[in-house]
Image (cartoon, helix red, strand yellow):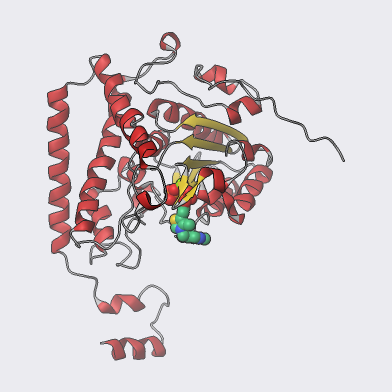
Amino acid sequence: MAEVRKPTRPTGQFVGPKYEYLTSSDEEKAFGLFQLMSDEGKLVHSTDHAIDKQLALQLYRGMQKIRIVDARMMALQRQGRIGFYGEALGQEAAVVGAAAAMQPQDWLIPALREAGAGLYRGLTLDSYIAQIFGNAADVTKGRQMPCHPCDKETNYVVMSSCVSSQIPHAVGIAWGMKIKGGSEACCVGFMGDGGTSEGEFHVALNFAGVSKVPVVLICQNNQWAISTPGKKQTASETIAIKGLGYGVESLRADGNDVLAVYEICRYATEKARRGDGPTFIELLTYRVSAHSSSDDPSRYRDESITEDWKTNKDPLKRMNTFLSDRGWLDADEDLAWQKDYEAQVRAAIARQEEIAQPRLETIVDDVFEEVPWHLKEQLAEIQ
Ligand SMILES: Cc1ncc(C[n+]2csc(CCOP(=O)(O)OP(=O)(O)O)c2C)c(N)n1
Ligand SMILES: [Mg+2]
């Protein structure tokens, strides 16, 4: 039997500047962990990285929006006003950094926790909240689970609830882009660490590698898939390394470092739009919240580890320090901004909660051009 080649692993975490990271070996990129900011919000390589103030602030605001919206939605769920919710607490940098690397013409295929990317790209609060209530203003007419939003205007595709099924969707859309040609767009598809154990992961990565489609596949490795920890999910040392077997360039970055996420994702989206093929990205983060409003993680994990991620590795705190150190953020203004945004969220909730449920007849819409007799009969029976 041929000897299996052992990859040469880098000894420590990769914290160099972007171009140095991207020109390192395939194994270094897939085993390392690209960072631009330390856990404390200090630039790791201060000399060689120009960071745009406006963008840095925009990234911070994008993360804050998710945190504020999620907190309100969880409160509504606890008050029995919505049925279900899944937060992205602690994962805001991965979501926003990736969204910021996209152009308006790009498509986003979310997995479980990317609604904030939708908000960042222009999904309105009203549309998002209408979809959570499933009211008459909901573009999906109340047919979807909460936390499965979509937005045609911003190419934000509704999530299929079957774990990992979104990855072939992303690759398929990118394949369509390649066949059609001329759009200079790419498709960014998300998955969780749990998603990488499903067959669709293999199918999608394989197809992406062979057909060289303009796709960026991002795994938010939050180290849990409901109650399954990362160690039981895979024996692979990193998730990124899996992409190499499919001939797909694979990168690994600190998912709580919004600047690093943005840089890596921008590299990958630009590469895809140029026609230089797919990239697989693992963003290492932590699911600080429960899996969803129906879950109690204290029953299956050590919450002192969660507390450590929450207090010492929080992506918002980190960016706050980064901005404050540069004099780019005024604490009072920041507080005022948060209050104002929370008021906007509360106002949107108030507007949407007023709106009635979709009319019953809508359950037979949109499937057939003419509603067939048997559906008419069933509808009459329900009515
Ligand atoms: C095919 C399939 N199996 C199981 C489930 C139930 N389920 C929903 S989310 C989830 C875990 C997902 O974990 P991960 O992919 O890591 O995403 P995360 O929740 O951590 O964001 C499971 C098992 C499902 N929705 N689809
Ligand atoms: Mg997970």
Q: Nearer the viewer, residue 312 or 83?
A: 312
Residue at the right extreme of this rendering? 1
Query: Compared with residue 323, is residue 235 higher up or lower down, i.e. above or below?
Result: below
Quarter occupied by residue 54: top left
Give percent across and percent down for residue 17.
Answer: 50, 17
The quarter of the picture where the C terminus appears is: bottom left
The quarter of the picture where the N terminus appears is: top right
Q: Residue at x 44, y 26 (%)?
A: 260
Query: Compared with residue 324, is residue 180 higher up or lower down, i.e. above or below?
Result: below
Tell how many labels: 0
Give percent across and percent down for residue 49.
Answer: 43, 14
Left or right, 291 with reference to 68: right
Quarter occupied by residue 66: top left
Residue at the top extreme of this rendering? 47
Give percent across and percent down for residue 112.
Answer: 41, 51
- Is residue 186 visible to us here? no
- Is residue 383 visible to us here? yes
Query: Compared with residue 131, is residue 156 higher up or lower down, i.e. above or below?
Result: above
Left or right, 60 with reference to 101: left
Q: Residue at x 56, y 48 (%)?
A: 233
Left or right, 190 with reference to 72: right
Query: Compared with residue 272, is residue 226 higher up or lower down, i.e. above or below?
Result: below
Q: Nearer the viewer, residue 313 or 273?
A: 313
Give percent across and percent down for residue 230.
Answer: 52, 43
Q: Nearer the viewer, residue 97 or 375?
A: 97
Quarter occupied by residue 334: top left
Q: Residue at x 26, y 47 (%)?
A: 70
